[in-house]
Image (cartoon, rainbow, N blue to C red):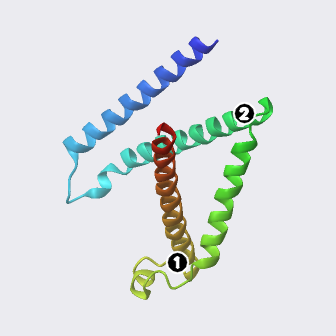
Amino acid sequence: MKESLRKIILWAALAVAIIGSICCILFAMKYDKNNPDSFAGLYNLAYGIVLVLIALCIIGMLYFVILRIVKGNGKGLLIGIGLLAIVCVVSYLLSSSTDLSQTFLDKYAATESTSKLVGAGVYATYALVIVSVLAIVYVELAQIFKKK
């Protein structure tokens, strides 16, 4: 069963790669900068493929999360998801609606809530990068002192 699933995934990935390559080559060969709307169909195809791939990734992620929880070793996973949710909530609470300039808001017709979400995303990214770097430093230092 595992081997047949592996083959299906391999062929699906190859098909997506070939379709993406063909779209890229067609776009490069026939793009007209004077008429950028001439490739709306190609753009829609590529966008549809991206949406399908994102959906497949989410379905796969949920499948393996549920499988891990059912097997009984999902405690660490649930703690990690909870901590990530806490980081996102704290980032949202810390962000203000003035994270983007008024010029940007006017230019892209964005709202203050969009500005708040952007600020929350930036703060969450900063927090996760800092935590990742600290975790890497901790693991490396622990290995160095463990060897001595």
Q: Residue at x 50, y 54 (%)?
A: 132
Residue under label 1: 115
Q: Residues within 10 Å of mark 1 (few under 14, many from 20)?
A: many
The nearer-to-camera label among 1 and 2 is 2
Q: Which numbered circle lies on residue 68?
A: 2
Q: Tell me: residue 71, above or below residue 130.
A: above
Decide: marks 1, 2 in contact (CB < 8 A)? no
Circle nearer the N terminus (1, 2): 2
Amino acid identity at mark 2: Arg
Image quarter (top left, top right, bottom left or bottom right) of the N terminus: top right
Residue 124 spot, x, y in % from top left? 55, 65
In-front residue for pair 82/45: 82
Relative horizontal placement of residue 11, taking residue 43 as reference (left or right): right
Q: Tell me: residue 28, above or below residue 135.
A: above
Q: Secondary structure at mark 1?
A: helix
In-front residue for pair 105/73: 73
In-front residue for pair 22/118: 118
Residue 64 quadrant: top right
Q: CA distance from mark 1 to mark 2?
A: 37 Å
Report the number of discs.
2
Residue 108 spot, x, y in % from top left? 43, 76
Q: Residue at x 38, y 48 (%)?
A: 43
Q: Residues within 10 Å of mark 2 (few under 14, many from 20)?
A: some
Residue 59 spot, x, y in % from top left? 64, 38
Residue 33 spot, x, y in % from top left? 20, 57
Q: Residue at x 20, y 60 (%)?
A: 34
Q: Secondary structure at mark 2?
A: helix
Amino acid identity at mark 1: Ser
Q: Residue at x 63, y 39 (%)?
A: 61
